[in-house]
Structure formats: C-alpha cells, structure tokens
Image (tube, grey):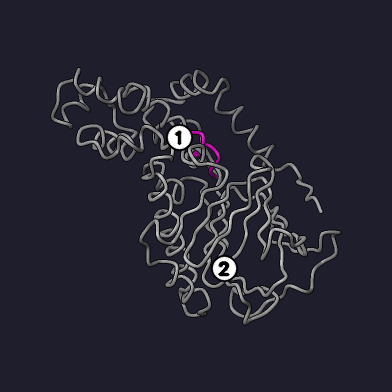
Amino acid sequence: MDAMAGLLDGPRARGAFLLRSAMDPPWSLRVQDEAPLTIVAIVRGHAWLLPEGRDAGAPPVRLDVGDVAIVLGPDPYVVADDPATAPQAVIHPGQRCTTPDGVELDAMRELGVRTWGNDPDGETVMLTGTYHLEGEVSRRLLRALPPRLVLREDEWDCPVIPLLADEVVKDAPGQEAVLDRLLDVLLIAVLRAWFARPEAEAPGWYRASADPVVGPTLRLLHHEPARPWTVEALASEAGVSRAALARRFHDLVGEPPMSFLTGWRIALAADLLLEPGATVGSVAHEVGYGSAFALSTAFKRVRGVSPSVWRTRVAADDAAPVEAAV
C-alpha cells in the first residue's frame, strides 16, 4: 500500500458521503462540514467556488460541465450560482443543514435517491463526494495538495463523471459499493492528472515512482514495510549496486532509502495504533520492528512522544466536542 492507495484504503480511512445536488438560481451554500477532502464534479450547468480560510481572498472559480474541483478542509467554502449570491444554507458536520442564522432548513429537500436541492429539474446538477479521511498515511498525500485544485474538462480524459451521475440515482442491491468504487476511481484519476501538471508540487516519492530503479524500490518499501530491508537488499532487488541505488534514491526522493522507510513505518504505526485492539507489540510486528521497545524508541525519535502518549493525545482530540459555527 502506497500513500495514494492509503488515502482510501489505509488504516482509519473512511468511505465517502456522496450526494447529487439539483439547484435552480438563485442558490448559494456555505459548506463548513470540516471534511478533510471534498470532490465536486459538475454534471449540468455551472457553479462558482468561493474559498475561505487559508485561501480567503483568492478569486472565485467558475466550474462548468465536466470540470472537477478538490477542496481541502477543514476550512469552509461557498459554492453558488453566482459570486454575488448570499449563502442561503449552511452545511455543518454530519451533513446537517441550516439557514445562516441557525434555523433547520426546509427549502433544500430530498428530491429522490441520493439527490438534494431546491428543484428536481434545476439548472445546475453537481456531484459532491465528501471524504472523512484520518491518519498519517492520508496526510502524506494531502500535504502535497493546494487548498483547492481544479481540472477542466479539456485538461484530462476520464469517463467516470457521466457514469457516476447515472449510477448515483439508482437504488439497486450493492449500489453503495458501486458508488464508493466509482468515486474512488474519480478521486485517484483527478490526483494523478493533477500531479502530472508542471505547476503541481508532487512529493519526491510520487515523481520517483516512474523511475525504473527507484520506482520498484519504493513499491517494495510501501508494500512490504515489515521486511528487514537494507540498502544492499533493496539494491539486489533493483539489480543495481548499493551505491547506485543510494545515490539515485536520494537524488529523486530527497532522502536516503532507510530514512524514507523509517518515516513510512512510523506513519503506518501512528495509524495502526489507533485501531481497536491494537497493541504497541502487534503494531511493531506489522511495520517491521522486532519488539514494542524498538518501535517505541523509533517512534519517540521521529515524533517526539511515545506510541502510548500519541494514542492518548489523538483519542482525546477525536473525543473533543466541536461547535459548528452558524
């Protein structure tokens, strides 16, 4: 599992909430659900994306049919028919919807299977997938993304949006699994297309994945972190000398192979420690440390705290109440 796969399938990754919205002007939604990642695809009409928080002050972006946007949380944002339209509804954590002054909203209503809005035949139809991702594995990828990114229909080639739009309104056996997988495919396709752009600051390990020597080495480290790797063993697998691998890996990834492996193991451990029933000893075995003591030593050296303290802090943060602004 690399960080791209871990974004969706790794420890503590969560499935997405998928919704089809049908809107007729004037309309404007302020989204403050604090979701780490949201993907918006326009099926019909258009919408304007107005950033807030870290990206406040950036110009509004118009999204047209076939365009896709990714917005990183927890900062709020507004999506509207026009930048001048004042928000009529606020989306809170848990997908609770109110008016801007906090009154439970009736104007926006269910319009069918996984469909919501103010008009079933609305001028604009958009798909919104909200990912409640958690953990260090996901963050390794999310840290490389801007607060918002947009791909235009003519900038990439992906047939998933029309297919997802057709499937989202169906209510057949196994449909949730179908939609989850289609949305995941769309997200991965968007991220791949984005990182291929010259202005995207892809992580070194992502760029190096295409290298004929470093790419296979990274896949070995990602998929088999528990193996007792050495640079010599990795070089043997890659069919190059130890010195050649060490030099090429550092040049492309930005750090030595063993340093990268340590960071990857500790990221995995940080997530696995939060799984129900996990012990420091069981996690140590999964990520390549011979004992709980060895993992604790490495974890504290990298994170500054022991695994037990880490787990307690994250659990306390997760349990802290969040007051939604209205």
| Amino acid on which the number 1 mark rests in the picture | Val
96 vs 7: above or below: below
At mark 2, the secondary structure is strand
Residue 69 x/y as whole percent: 53, 55
Residue assigned mark 1: 283
Which of these two is toward me, 50 or 267? 50
Q: Residue at coordinates 38% horizontally, 51% vertically from top-left?
A: 193
Q: Residue at coordinates 68% horizontally, 38% vertically from top-left?
A: 317
Q: Residue at coordinates 79% horizontally, 48% vertically from top-left?
A: 323
Q: Is residue 273 magenta?
A: yes
Q: Cα distance, mark 2 to mark 1? A: 41 Å
| Amino acid on which the number 2 mark rests in the picture | Met
Mark positioned earlier in the residue sequence (2 or 1): 2
In this picture, which residue range is highlighted in magenta?
269-275
Residue 237 x/y as whole percent: 17, 32
Residue 35 x/y as whole percent: 62, 51
Q: Is residue 21 left or right of residue 42?
A: right
Tag 2: Cα neighbours inside 10 Å, few (<14), some, or many (≥20)? many
Disc ID at residue 194: none
Q: Quadrant of the C terminus?
A: bottom right
- Mark 2 vs mark 1: give the one in front: 2
* Quarter-of-image position of residue 174: bottom left
Q: Is residue 253 left or right of residue 270?
A: left
Residue 15 x/y as whole percent: 52, 57
Q: Quadrant of the N terminus?
A: top left
180 vs 316: above or below: below
* Quarter-of-image position of residue 256: top left
Residue assigned mark 2: 126
84 vs 218: above or below: below
At mark 1, the secondary structure is helix
